[in-house]
Amino acid sequence: MGLSRSQPEVDNDSANWNIPPFWHKLNSFFLFPFQRTPFMYAVVLSLCAYAMFMGLLIGIAVFVGLMLAVSRYAFKAAAYASRGVLDSSDYDHYPLDADLKVLPWKFFGVLLVHGFVIGMLAQASLKLGVLGNLGSSFLIPVTLMVLISTGSLSSAINPFILLGTIAGIGLPYFLLCLFLFLLMQGAPMAMGFLLVLVPKAMLAPLMAFVIIYFLWVIAAMIGYVMYQNHAEFGIEPDKAPEAEGGSTVQIDPQAAEAKRRDAAVAQLVQNGDMQAAQDEAREWQRLNYDNVADQRRYHRVLKLTDKTAELARHGQQFIDLLLRKQQASEALEVWGSCYKRMPGFKLESAEATLALASTAWKRQQVSHALAVLQNFEKNYPGSPVIPQAQELIVRVLKQGLGKPDQAVRVFMRMKMRHPEHPSTQEAAWILRDELPQDSTKPTAPVAPV
């Protein structure tokens, strides 16, 4: 299917994407807080600053609440930017799996650790304390990146992980720190102007807005640097970089969500927590019974367990879904997985069984075709597709396995029970060299199954 000029073709392999460096996107970072959703949220939070003057306890509670709300949205903006989603209006289309609500608390824990180390260094020497403070400032951006990508406090304070991440990013990390330093100088300068120009009644919310503005600009910039280095952080982007003319090629949100769920379950399996992996995959497939990716994930997890009965039960509905979605080749593979674990496995539908056998025959998987059709007449008594199935058995035995004698025996049963059926006539044509001449006289060849 062709793509229009506004949607140019982009390599789906994100490792090959040419993502512009963050200094080419500065305007988008500075404009991010003015997008409709973050702007309205920032205004509401800024107005809450009035409540800080309603008493000491209320003021402390409001301050803590504001800091939590502002920092949570900052982490959210950075997390989305790390996946290439720079427009807040797209957030609902790309749900995040990670729980970002706890990250501000974990970041506070990182700051406590940094403060403890800086305090120890300052006790030993004032110069060491200054160096420790500079080192902490240098590590804050990468700490935020590691927290967003892993959600792990231990990883965020591990110097080897932090330095390894910096080495992976390279020189752009030092440039990022320079830009962030300049941004941090911008906030007090803006507040200085407000103190001179703004009436005191409006000072509190406007100063709060300035702080929110610069924090969210910083978050968007840090997230974008993660997007530039998404392979380093193990991130699967949701959007490709902007193409010529400013258009953005979107990745199918469902495909992106499927990849994230696959990665989450794979991580549980890798960690040896098979029960959690099975529970997670089972819940997704239960909620999305018509979603091939969710059903496929659950099938793969079941293959790693000893729950043969559940594998067979789920295999029935998964094969039916694949056939309805016209994915017969994968349906045959699922059947093979179930049959291997349960040799007596058979589908509930005669039509589905015949469709699988026909797919196996077309793919030259002769043994599979015959195994699918085994005991067909016994398994589906009275089915109207029995003659077609027997015709396919004749074809497999004669043309696939070179066993015309067995094929003739099947044909004789067909001739006795379905003498006028087109499939019986076609079977006679297939066996024209093995049967007497009068057995094939009445017919011309019928299109093969």
Image (cartoon, helix red, strand yellow):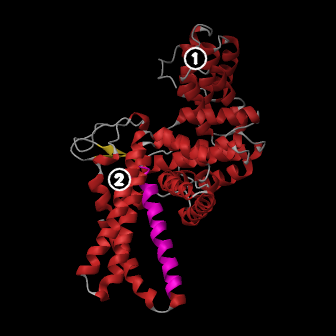
**Which disc, if any, is residue 298?**
none
Task: Please report whichever mark, 2 or 1, sits nearer to the chain's N-terminal start.
Answer: 2
State the SS at label 1. Answer: helix
Instruction: Tell me if mark 1 has few (under 14), some (14-19) or many (20+) residues whose alpha carbon lies within 10 angstroms of its own.
Output: many
Do the numbered discs 2 and 1 sit on residues whose CB atoms are within 8 Å?
Answer: no
Is 370 on the left or on the right of 39, as rendered? right
**Residue, x 65% and y 10% (percent of image)?**
402
Query: Is 61 placed above or below 251 here?
Result: below
Q: Amino acid at mark 2?
A: Phe
The residue singled out by tag 2 in the image is 179
The segment highlighted magenta reads: 59-87
State the SS at label 2. Answer: helix
Q: Quadrant of the N terminus?
A: top left
Q: Position of residue 183 (x, y in %)?
A: 34, 60
Secondary structure mostly taken by the magenta-highlighted segment of the chain: helix
Query: Is 393 placed above or below 15 here?
Result: above
Q: CA distance from mark 2 to mark 1?
A: 82 Å
Is 217 on the left or on the right of 232, as rendered? left
The residue singled out by tag 1 in the image is 428
